[in-house]
Every structure is written in structure tokens, then in C-alpha cells.
Amino acid sequence: MMGRMRCPSCGYESNPQGAEFCVACGAYFNGKTPAENPQQSVWQQMPGPQAQAAASRQKAPVGTAGGWISRVRGGEVIDDEKYADLIADCLDDIRRPSMPQAGAQPEEGLSDLALMLEDRELLPDMMSAMKARSLGEGDRPSAMQSANEYTFLALETFSVYTDLGDMADICATAASDLGDLCAHMKELPEVQAKGPTQVEFLDNYASFFTMMEGRMRARMAEESPERLEYLSDYWAEKSGKRFTQLAYGAANMNVQLLGSGWLSTKIATKGRDMQLDTFISIYFSPKQP
């Protein structure tokens, strides 16, 4: 079929052209696992100290999240008090520079932990707490680091949520929160640096999530409630990490629009839109019985 890819693992023939994995069985077309297919982090686009801090965090071993996963698996009941401790611990962990360890990323543990806490909304709750931290910072570099982590948490929700309406709601929340963080950033003393300012980065982030929400809601309006419910249930049985890859990829391209020349901006815009189109195409590809 023109424009489609056949999965060499299960034989499914209706994968969108350019997809990285099979929508039926989840196998990667290059034979690698998700852990071996790292997306270039959006934070690597950031200049200065915040990029260095984020890079060191990305290489950190799974620690706090993994510890809480072991406690939950061991049968420990996470009441409201322990849940508050869990959020504080995980926020501290992703903000704290750790000893580098190649190939390990703490965010993998967060999505797994969120899936285990079925009666909680871990990642949205962490987004809210991280926003509060950023609003409480008194200088731009610290506020920007927290805002970067907030954006990472928002993107990571694609590993957990499979209902497109929920995803659109999270994007709307992220766009609104980042707008608040941008307003707070404008009140802080400016930091002289080459390239885009912190305010420009936050405005870029907010615009990206607004675009994501718009695309999702536009496609949802074309589908029946029954079809949307089927897709939500279908993807709930699959690995949500596939959507996270596409969200990160689109976010990376969107960041590249800042300070780029005409040609680079055109290429980044095309790459971003292709990532978003692929996400929508893959999400709606399963055929309802």
C-alpha cells in the first residue's frame, strides 16, 4: 500500500510511512528498543547553565522514582501524606545534579510510577508543584530551570495518558501555566546572554502546547465519541512511550525556531509539523472492529 509500512515482526501493513514502531505490536522498525532510541532532548537547545543542569540530570541513574516503585510493589499504601513526600522527593531528584551514568534517565521511572498509582494524577500534580517552585524563584536562571522541568513533565504525560481529550486538557493547562511563568519571568532581573531570552523560550513553549491542543481538538471534532473511546482503550493496552517520542521530537523542532535564519526556520517548522502529523496519524490508525 502506497505510503504505508509493513511491520517485519507481526506483518501489520498499515503503519504510517516514516513511523518508528508498529502500531499493532509496538516493535521498532530498526530493531532497537525504546531505551536505545533516545530523542535529542529539548533541553539541549537551551543555552547556559540551565542546559548544563538539565544535561546532567538526563544522565542521572534512576533513583528516587525507582525507590518509590519498589515500595509500591512491596505493598506499601501511599496515603496523602506519603504522596506529598513522594512528589517532593521526585521533584528534588530531577532538579539535583547527579553522578552521570550513561544510558539511564530518571524520567523513565516517573512514567512507570505514575502508571502504578492509578488513583493519583502524579505527573499533572508534579507539574503543578514544579510551577509553584518556578514562581517562587527570585532569579531568572533558577526560574528557567524549574520551567524547563515543568515542560519536561508535561511532555512526559504522553507516556501515561491515552485519551486524546485528557492529552488536550494537559496541553491547555501547560500553555496557561507557561504563560504565568512567562509573566513571572518578566518581573525578574534580566540576565545578559547570547541568543533567545528566557522569556522567549517560555513563550515558545506555551505556543507549542497551544498548537498541540488545537490539533488534537480539531481531529477529535471529526470523530464520534464511540471511536474516541475505542482508541483510548486500544492505546491503554499499548506502550504510551511511543507518543512521548513524537511529542519530544516536535518540541525539539519547535525550539529550533528561536533565533534561526529563514531556511533553518522553514526546515524546523516542517520537521515539527511532520512529527505532529505522525502522532495524529498513528493515534487514529487502529481499525475499530
Image (cartoon, rainbow, N blue to C red):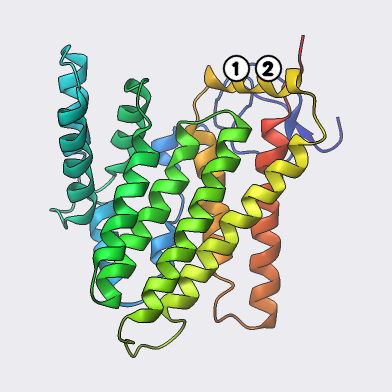
The residue that appears at 34% across and 56% down in the rendered structure is: 131
Residue 77: where, in percent of width, then height? 18, 16
Marking on residue 230: 2
User: Taking 84 as reference, is 129 left or right?
Assistant: right
Marking on residue 98: none
Residue 141: where, in percent of width, then height? 28, 74
Is residue 125 visible in the rendered structure shown here?
A: yes
Secondary structure category for the residue under label 2: helix
Tell me whether the residue at label 2 lies in contact with that at label 1, contact meaning CB atoms closer than 8 angstroms. yes
Between 29 and 45, the one lying in front of the other is: 45
Q: CA distance from mark 2 to mark 1?
A: 5 Å
Tally of marks = 2
Residue type marked 1: Asp
The residue that appears at 66% across and 25% down in the rendered structure is: 7
Q: Is residue 169 above or below residue 189?
A: above
**In the rendered image, which residue does mark 1 sit on?**
233
The residue that appears at 44% across and 64% down in the rendered structure is: 180
Residue type marked 2: Tyr
Between 209 and 246, the one lying in front of the other is: 209
User: Taking 223 as reference, is 176 left or right?
Assistant: left
Residue 90: where, in percent of width, then height? 21, 42
Q: Is residue 153 above or below residue 116?
A: below
The residue that appears at 18% across and 44% down in the rendered structure is: 88
Q: Is residue 11 above or below residue 5?
A: above
Residue 251: where, in percent of width, then height? 54, 57
Identify the image quadrant of residue 74.
Answer: top left
Secondary structure category for the residue under label 1: helix
Residue located farthest toward the right when viewing the structure as drawn: 2
Mark 1 Cα shell of 10 Å, populated few (<14), some (14-19), many (≥20)? few
